[in-house]
């Protein structure tokens, strides 16, 4: 079998090389996970939560090492300090609600002589297939709650961030998590498919492309393994005429270009009321020009390379296709010295004179490009926002909270924001509609996804 290799987008060098696990090692890992999970499920929730929080502390202690390591693996500038602010926020929230979320459900009509309740039983072995773009944040959405709920976890991380899985294992071991309960395993695509088809795992959480999600479903078909899938996105924003213009521009530029646009909920298309379209676009382009594209290990860099050259090539292709159909590019790539054809270093781009006949407005970009269109009404904005096979998040920029809620109810999406974007609130379910996937993470609903109901109907005689 071919080795699993991470090529750094920073300079094209080989950063890490790992051999896929042997079939014997995979079987051993599954057996160990099953044995550990049986015992772990007997541990009180409070003790399970405490163990996960010890893991969190061990992971946070590694932050200084992890930030530059992450920049080398996938290109995010070190000036942003990694992912552990959100990592900690999510874990602390899920820890705080775990006991209440996992307690038995009692019927509303108590009956004398009966003990009736629904317990929340762990599923068993949870397989997490994690992506490279937010390799700590996306993985912890499932790993932390799954362990708190009494499951064992096997982590298969992306090749681009193969070292992240090892950091998870390092922190779990340092925290004294029982042997076998959490295991990081290096698997290739064929091995992953065979594992899914074997029925040896009880739940799979996958974050990645729509094609990847379909492959997961096909591999698991017939096993009745439950699935959580967070797939593609083309997240829209709508800026109404009553929006705070400066605030909307500042936040939407960041929402479009943070992490080089490689965000599941990054803003990829913007619709602006025609009354403020020109000043919005001018301010948006002016702020975009202030980005510094370069080596992510340099503190001055605000925009790093994309994770792989082929991702940058896709964005360049979308831009050229849009321009060939009449779009106007407002950013001169030559102003960014690091921008080079054939490399992952790509200048941010703002496109106007765009429409939905252009791929950049309807197909996932996952890079530093955004198209901006004028609209004449809320109804026009809703129609365009819904003209997509995806639905993860949508943001509405306005001073009118009632209007935002009304518009939000009409938009086909998993999360509606008002005056913010590109954020995950752990108190709310992280979910999507249409081709963006199925299932949910975080919030009490996240615990529902990682447990199964078991009903007890106990009748006393005499």
Image (spheres, rainbow, N blue to C red):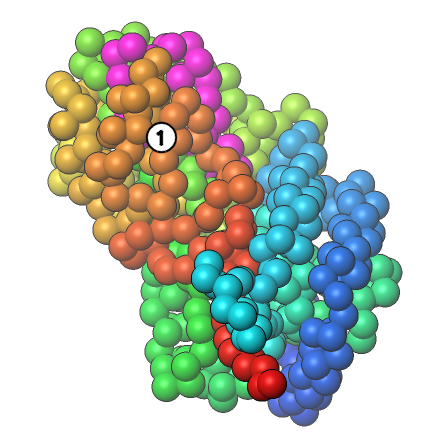
- Residue 249 falls within the magenta-colored stretch: yes
Q: Which residue is at the front of the view, 329 or 80?
A: 80
Placement of 371 over or under 205, stated as above or below: above
Count numbered badges in the picture: 1
Residue linked to disc 1: 395
Using a 10 Å C-alpha cutoff, classify the residue at mark 1 as few (fewer than 14 neighbours), some (14 to 19) or many (20 or more): many
Placement of 450 over or under 318, stated as above or below: below
Q: Which residue is at the front of the view, 153 or 372?
A: 153
The answer, for residue 163, to whether it is visible in the render is: no
In the image, what residue occupies the spot 59% across and 82% down?
460
Judged from the image, the secondary structure of the residue bearing numbered disc 1 is strand
The answer, for residue 356, to whether it is visible in the render is: yes
The majority secondary structure of the magenta stretch comes to helix
Q: Which residue is at the front of the view, 44 or 203?
A: 44
Q: Position of residue 131 (x, y in %)?
A: 53, 57
- 55 sits to left or right of 202: right
In the image, what residue occupies the spot 31% across and 16% down?
400
> Which image quarter holds the C terminus?
bottom right
- 69 sits to left or right of 420: right
Q: Position of residue 233 (x, y in %)?
A: 35, 47
Placement of 69 over or under 277, stated as above or below: below
In the image, what residue occupies the spot 69% across and 87% down?
31
In the image, what residue occupies the spot 26% across and 22% down?
403
**Which residue lies most toward the front here?**
462
> Which image quarter holds the N terminus?
bottom right
Tell me which segment is drawn in magenta: 237-262
- Residue 400 falls within the magenta-colored stretch: no
Q: Position of residue 210 (x, y in %)?
A: 34, 60
Which quadrant of the figure has residue 222? bottom left
């Amino acid at each position: 079998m071919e080795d699993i290799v991470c090529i750094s987008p920073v300079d094209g060098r080989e950063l890490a090389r790992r051999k896929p696990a042997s079939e014997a090692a995979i079987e051993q890992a599954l057996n160990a996970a099953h044995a550990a999970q049986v015992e772990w499920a007997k541990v009180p929730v409070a003790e399970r939560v405490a163990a996960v929080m010890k893991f969190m502390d061990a992971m946070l202690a590694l932050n200084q090492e992890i930030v530059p390591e992450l920049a080398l693996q996938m290109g995010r500038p070190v000036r942003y300090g990694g992912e552990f602010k959100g990592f900690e926020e999510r874990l602390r929230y899920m820890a705080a609600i775990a006991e209440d979320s996992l307690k038995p459900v009692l019927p509303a009509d108590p009956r004398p002589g009966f003990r009736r309740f629904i317990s929340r039983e762990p599923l068993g072995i949870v397989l997490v297939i994690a992506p490279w773009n937010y390799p700590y944040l996306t993985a912890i959405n499932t790993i932390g709650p799954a362990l708190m709920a009494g499951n064992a976890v096997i982590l298969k991380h992306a090749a681009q961030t193969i070292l992240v899985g090892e950091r998870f294992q390092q922190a779990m071991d340092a925290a004294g998590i029982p042997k076998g309960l959490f295991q990081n395993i290096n698997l290739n695509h064929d091995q992953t498919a065979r594992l899914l088809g074997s029925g040896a795992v009880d739940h799979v959480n996958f974050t990645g492309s729509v094609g990847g999600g379909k492959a997961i479903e096909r591999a698991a078909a017939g096993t009745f393994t439950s699935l959580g899938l967070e797939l593609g996105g083309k997240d829209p924003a709508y800026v109404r005429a009553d929006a705070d213009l400066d605030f909307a521009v500042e936040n939407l530029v960041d929402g479009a270009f943070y992490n080089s646009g490689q965000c599941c909920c990054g803003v990829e298309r913007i619709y602006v009321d025609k009354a403020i379209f020109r000043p919005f676009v001018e301010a948006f382009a002016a702020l975009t020009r202030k980005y510094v594209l370069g080596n992510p290990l340099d503190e001055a860099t605000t925009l790093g390379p994309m994770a792989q050259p082929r991702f940058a090539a896709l964005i360049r292709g979308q831009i050229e296709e849009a321009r060939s159909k009449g779009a106007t590019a407002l950013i001169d790539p030559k102003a960014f010295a690091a921008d080079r054809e054939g490399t992952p270093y790509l200048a941010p781009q703002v496109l106007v004179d765009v429409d939905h006949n252009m791929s950049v407005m309807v197909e996932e970009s996952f890079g530093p490009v955004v198209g901006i269109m004028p609209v004449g009404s809320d109804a026009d904005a809703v129609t365009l926002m819904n003209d997509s096979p995806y639905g993860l998040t949508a943001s509405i920029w306005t001073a009118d909270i009632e209007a935002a809620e009304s518009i939000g109810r009409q938009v086909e999406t998993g999360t509606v924001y008002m005056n913010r974007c590109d954020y995950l609130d752990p108190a709310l379910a992280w979910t999507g509609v249409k081709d963006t996937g199925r299932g949910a993470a975080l919030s009490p609903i996240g615990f529902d996804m990682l447990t199964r109901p078991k009903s007890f109907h106990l009748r006393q005689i005499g």
